[in-house]
Amino acid sequence: MGNRGCLHRGHTVVRNHSGKRWIICVTDYPARTVAQWSEGHYTVLFFHDEAVALAAGHRPCALCRRERYNDFRAAWQSAHGGGQPGADEMDARLHAERLVGSHQRTHEAPWSSLPDGAFALFDGGPALVLGETVVSWSAEGYGTPANRPTGTATVLTPPPTVAVLAAGYHPDVA
């Protein structure tokens, strides 16, 4: 489940995000229960799996996914240097890399450089990189694996997250 803040009025989504904190939460957390479309509360978003949520620019929640958050932070520190980052630091960097206006920012990189768990465009749609393959993804889920292309990819996963994946963070894939 994802959270980008309160994005709705009534049952209508009125904005893409509210703030820089885009997090990946568990769907069942006893201390935090919010019904979909609750007035004045965050808008509940659903992702197919963690790899899809990371490609959208989210990171693990420090509250309900603490172990995954700590793993992500450790990989972030390894990838980006410096001291162990806090949520605000990671969120600011991710936010600067995730959007161009209201649209998802992409970047170019060699297919050979992409770590497992990254998403790039393949045959006109998003695909997950897994080993020497790419697996097309749609709202129905993952398709049949194909050989990883050569050349340059249009990468959907934000650069700071690609670096975290390359540093050893392994996202949950359904």
Image: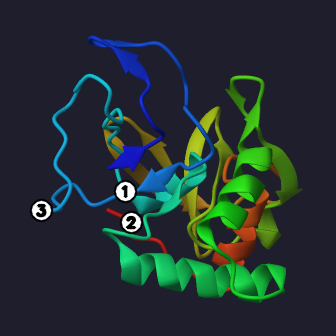
* Nearest-to-viewer mark from 1 and 3: 3
When the figure is inspected, residue 59 is found, relative to residue 46, above or below; the finding is below
| Mark with earlier residue (3, 2) | 3
Q: CA distance from mark 2 to mark 1?
A: 6 Å
Kindly identify the amino acid type of the residue bearing the numbered disc 1. Answer: Asp
Q: Give the secondary structure at mark 1.
A: loop
Q: Are marks 2 and 1 in contact (CB under 8 Å)?
A: yes
Label 1 sits on residue: 49
Q: Position of residue 140 (x, y in %)?
A: 31, 37
| Mark with earlier residue (2, 1) | 1
Q: Which residue is drawn at the image coordinates 27% and 11% (left, top)?
A: 10
Q: Position of residue 152 (x, y in %)?
A: 87, 53
Q: CA distance from mark 1 to mark 3?
A: 21 Å
Q: CA distance from mark 3 to mark 2?
A: 24 Å
Q: Give the secondary structure at mark 2.
A: loop
User: 10 Å neighbourhood of mark 2: few (<14), some, or many (≥20)?
Assistant: few
User: 10 Å neighbourhood of mark 1: few (<14), some, or many (≥20)?
Assistant: some
When the figure is inspected, residue 1 is found, relative to residue 31, above or below; the finding is above
Q: Which residue is drawn at the image coordinates 37% and 56% (left, top)?
A: 49
Label 2 sits on residue: 173
